[in-house]
Image (tube, grey):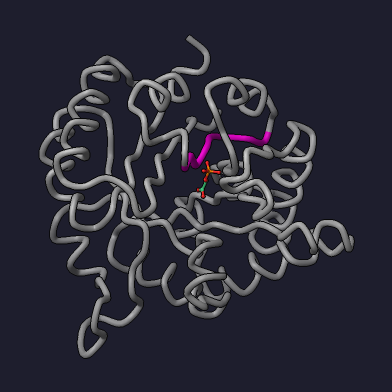
């Protein structure tokens, strides 16, 4: 049985006071939780404050991005060593907003995934097709390319730990959630692709989150699908009560 994993992607939202307030509320709501993984991915500047609040809870922290170079003249960037030094657990890599608004391509994402693993953290590797790609029937080819290039040269011992987030771009922030069947179909395809690239064992242990307009009232249907192991939540993760309801979708 794969352990469910639910992550909050705050994107560019919440200042330090709002972050601390949220973390205190969530820590209280989830203090007893021990059967699933929960991650908060705030803006970089709030990571450490949140870490200190949730340290004695089962909640973990994740960054929303990373640079693949070790250090140097990369104004505005954050390195793996910086994240590691504040005990960051996860890093979101290749979010569709990074791909479309900030020009990240599959090769760059591959370098970032390698950097995250080499520094002992776990990538949440985002993939997914645009509406145009879905409507023109190339959705499987697009996701397969994202997986093959994104994971090129990454060994099986690392791969077992990866978290993949399938986020159809047309469902992100639009209120248009993929149907349970559409999501399950793609999650199955992703797992089958991992079988071909690696083996059955890794494919069965990798956790695949669904992301794109996940809300308290649609999460349980998605989670009931056999290949959906969690959720990456944007808008609905900004309110502690709404995010708590998503995490506790089956209670
Ligand atoms: P959304 O965002 O839940 O607001 O659609 C999801 C994401 O971008 O990770």
Q: Nearer the viewer, residue 105 or 155?
A: 105
Q: Residue at x 29, y 59 (%)?
A: 120
Q: Residue furthest top?
A: 251
Give the answer, above or below, for where 111 lies relative to 151: below
The answer to whether residue 231 is magenta is yes
Q: How many marks?
A: 0
Q: Residue furthest bottom?
A: 73
Quadrant in which residue 135 is drawn: bottom right
Q: Which portion, as a residue range, is magenta?
A: 227-234
The answer to whether residue 197 is magenta is no
Give the answer, above or below, for where 208 lies relative to 34: below
x, y percent for residue 72: 20, 88
Give the answer, above or below, for where 242 lies relative to 186: above
Quadrant in which residue 223 is drawn: top right
Q: Nearer the viewer, residue 121 or 75?
A: 75
Q: Residue at x 41, y 72 (%)?
A: 112
Quadrant in which residue 92 is drawn: bottom left
Q: Residue at x 67, y 51 (%)?
A: 168
x, y percent for residue 21: 18, 31
Residue 80 in view (yes/no): yes
In which quadrant of the rendered image does the N terminus lie?
top right
Q: Nearer the viewer, residue 194 or 237?
A: 237
x, y percent for residue 40: 32, 41
x, y percent for residue 108: 49, 79
Q: Residue at x 53, y 22 (%)?
A: 216
Residue 205 in view (yes/no): no
């Amino acid at each position: 049985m794969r352990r469910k994993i639910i992550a909050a992607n705050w994107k560019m939202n919440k200042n330090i006071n709002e972050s601390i307030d949220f973390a205190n509320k969530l820590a209280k709501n989830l203090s007893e939780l021990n059967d699933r993984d929960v991650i908060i991915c705030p803006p970089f500047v709030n990571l450490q404050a949140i870490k200190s609040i949730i340290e004695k809870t089962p909640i973990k922290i994740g960054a929303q991005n990373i640079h693949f170079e070790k250090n140097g003249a990369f104004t505005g960037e954050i390195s793996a060593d910086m994240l590691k030094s504040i005990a960051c657990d996860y890093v979101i890599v290749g979010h569709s907003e990074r791909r479309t608004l900030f020009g990240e391509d599959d090769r760059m994402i591959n370098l970032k995934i390698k950097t995250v693993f080499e520094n002992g953290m776990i990538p949440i590797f985002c993939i997914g097709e645009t509406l145009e790609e879905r409507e023109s029937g190339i959705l499987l080819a697009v996701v397969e390319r994202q997986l093959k290039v994104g994971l090129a040269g990454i060994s099986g011992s690392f791969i077992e730990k990866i978290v993949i987030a399938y986020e159809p771009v047309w469902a992100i922030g639009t209120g248009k959630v993929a149907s349970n069947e559409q999501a399950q179909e793609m999650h199955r395809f992703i797992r089958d692709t991992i079988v071909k690239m690696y083996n059955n064992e890794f494919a069965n242990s990798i956790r695949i989150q669904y992301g794109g307009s996940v809300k308290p009232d649609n999460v349980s249907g998605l989670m009931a699908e056999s290949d959906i192991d969690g959720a990456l939540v944007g808008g609905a993760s900004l309110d502690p009560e709404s995010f708590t309801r998503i995490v506790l979708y089956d209670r």
